[in-house]
Image (tube, grey):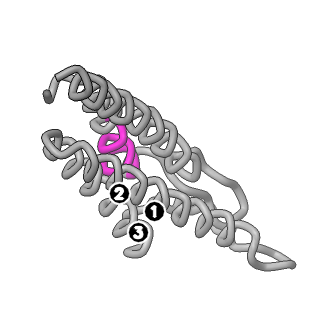
Amino acid sequence: MIQRIQTLYLFLSVVISAGLIFVFHLWTNTEDVKVFAANDYLYLSLFLASALLSLIAIFSFKNRKSQFVMGRVNIILNFILLGIFVYQSLNISGETNVSEKGIGILLPIFSIVCLVLANKAIKKDEDLVKSVDRLR
């Protein structure tokens, strides 16, 4: 069952959460220094927790209900990460320490889209199994 479409979506989420955080910067501060997620332990730990949760969900394909729950928890984790990014970029009323936003701030959004598509496919599989069980 590893060849299912939800595995592809979950793997894409792992790549986004664990790989692309080292490629794309989150923002550029006032000293023109690019800030990556690896520079701050909070961002790094949240991104890696999201990647680890997606990776665990890939290999728990025999238990679709727990896989679905892990997907939902991962979506909530990515929303928390996105909220922290928005708060960080809008927190100071005067001169802010975020002068230019990078594409790395959008990575949780891409991850959320992949996770929603994976949960939709998991739900579809679960409904298919339930309909077959009714016929027995």
Q: CA distance from mark 3 to mark 2?
A: 17 Å
Are circles 3 and 2 on residues that touch, CB within 8 Å?
A: no
Residue at 34% over, 47% down? 68
The numbered mark at residue 77 is: 1
Q: Is residue 87 left or right of residue 44?
A: right
Residue at 42% over, 53% down? 72
Q: Amino acid at mark 2?
A: Ser
Other-residue count near label 2 (Cα within 10 Å), few / some / many at <14 / 14–19 / ≥20: many
Residue at 31% over, 38% down? 10
Residue at 60% over, 57% down? 27
The percent coordinates of residue 31 (x first, y second) are 64, 68
> What residue would you read off at disc 2?
50
Q: Amino acid at mark 1?
A: Leu
Q: CA distance from mark 1 to mark 3?
A: 19 Å
- The magenta stretch spans which residues? 12-21
Q: Relative to 75, say whether 134 is above or below.
A: above
- Residue 37, by quadrant, is bottom left
Are circles 2 and 1 on residues that touch, CB within 8 Å?
A: yes
Badge 1 marks a residue whose secondary structure is: helix
Q: Relative to 97, say whether 32 is above or below.
A: above
Badge 2 marks a residue whose secondary structure is: helix
Q: Relative to 57, say whether 6 is above or below.
A: above
